[in-house]
Amino acid sequence: MRRAVSSVTVTVALGVLGATVAVPGVALAAPAAGAAPEPGKKRCTVTDERLRELSGLVATKSGYIVVNDSSQIEARKRVFFLDSKCKPAKEPVRYSGNGPFDTEDLALSPDGETLWIADTGDNITSTQRRERVAVWSMPVDGSERPVLHRLSYPEGKPHDAEALLIGDDNKPLIITKVASGKAEIFTPSGKLKSGDTDPVPMTKVGEVSLPKTNTPNLLNTIGRVAITGAARSPDGSRVVLRTYADAFEYDVAGGDIVGALTKGKPKVTQLTDPFGEAISYTTDGKSFVTVSDGGELAEDDPIEILAYTPSTKGAEALAGDDGGPPKPTAQKSWIEGLSLNEITYLIAAVGVIGALMVGAGVVGILRARRRPAADPKGGADPAEWDGGAGGRYPDQPPRRRDGSPDGDGGRGGVYGGAAGGGYGGAAAGPGPARGASGGVYGGGRPAGGPQGGRPAGGGRPESGGVYGGGRPAGGGVYGGGQPAARPPAGGRPARGGQPGGGGGAYGGGRPEPPRAAGPRDPRPGRPGDGGWDDGRGGYGPPPGRGHRGDRH
């Protein structure tokens, strides 16, 4: 058993490892080497326990407005207002109706009077993807509850999107989050509807291809392309997209945000958020402010709002590991060539393999428990040492656990003897860990063969099976004869419900008459109903008696 446990432990450990390293091994790879970014300047620390999963941020003159990522906690499904020290400034605002499904970003209207909320999160690992998404709108001062506006993507194709911008026409621009390739931009094809209505279809209006950088981050390559937030400057002349690693700022001419994102060349500011998913311009437009989603961090990691001065440089110096051109395809890691869906399937496959290995370990444990213990004395056949009419081994006299004679073998041995084995049944053919009469789990009529073997037939236990089928015979705990007048030779005392002898704790019948020590006659005979062994191979009550043992 110890050997089995050792091998199973290794198997289970490998299974758990396979199931848990998928994300760290594929997504959370070690950050690539690169120039260390200048840390953001700490503005304040968010200490409210309801704000551990921040994904949307807007800076105001008096502080900040924030929302959480998707949450199952009702108290976190609110729009929160903070002062300049990140303390709650007033009561959070509830949503109307049933509230949002997965909020991801905040944006301000061009006039700064309306707050827009992107309810567009749709993780590709979800078992059921969203058929429709939504945006919500409310006064920026929180004087009214948010109003729902439902939207749908072209052809009903799902997308995960975490970035929102509002154009000069007050229509939302939703930018998707991808692990490789180009992000897509969608906008409503018609006027928005309010309330729980049919969704307004959206159309695709462009694609965004971010320049390559080598900024260190927890998600490595994926973290440099997955867009997690967006913002527009107060004067409307610039927009910024952020990833887990960088902020990409584009100049906007004539209010053409789509043209700026699809054709412009951005300036790149390296970010140092641990797991940043939100960005905003300050009210003067001179700085970015960012915050991390603490749901991906340790419980004691601080949630800080950081400020950065926008860079005036492009991404050329950040391309490749050494600032040079991107690596040739042949030199790239195979992971860098995978799409987000392919990475998801890879993670799922590794998890399934891990689960199968764990299952194999459990099966190994169960089989090991059913398998008889190995003979510590080196015997080739367990029947040679795990039975007979003596102690635990055939070449030893019956002995107690403490070494004194007349103990756990013979009639009443722990692992089975002639009569009274702990796991024994009737005297039957050879088999490991079985006894004759008085077995706890024994059953069946006695058959020929060495005493201590497996019960050969039937559903009736011989003398004293606790859980055996049929009627108990003499000596079972829950059935059989009354206690013997003396302890059977080679076993424990029969009184008090102990196996062995001819008396069960709850049994009936007559006591077994005294007889010489030694195994019972193995000759076949009909089991009696709680009676006694007449010494000639017959089992049954004395003449004139017919008492049956109790059944429980």
Image (cartoon, grey):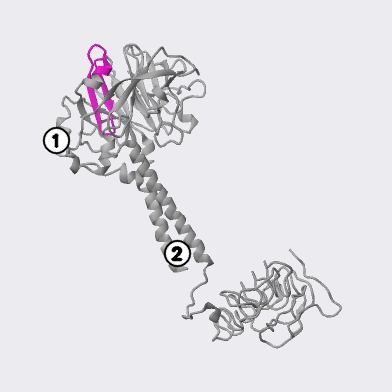
Whether residue 431 is visible here, answered yes or no, is: yes
Is residue 247 on the magenta stretch?
Answer: yes
Q: Tell me the quadrant of the picture where the C terminus can be found.
A: bottom right
Q: Residue furthest left?
A: 324
Q: Classify 366 as above or below 324.
A: below
58 or 470, which is in the foreground? 470
Question: In which image quadrant can residue 499 be found?
Answer: bottom right
Residue 439, by quadrant, is bottom right
State the residue lying farthest toward the bottom: 516
What residue do we see at 40% from left, 47% from top?
351
Q: Amino acid at mark 2?
A: Val
State the extent of the magenta-drawn residues as a range: 235-259
| Three-letter residue code for mark 1 | Pro
Percent x, y of residue 201:
41, 18
> What crowding class fits label 1: few (fewer than 14 Cα within 10 Å), some (14-19), or many (20 or more)?
few
Image x and y of residue 319, in percent: 17, 34
Q: Give the residue at mark 1.
A: 325
Is residue 461 covered in magenta?
A: no
**Location of mark 2 (residue):** 5
Q: Is residue 528 left or right of residue 343?
A: right
Where is residue 465? Give x, y as percent: 68, 71
Residue 301 shows in the view: no
Q: Nearer the viewer, residue 81 or 529?
A: 529
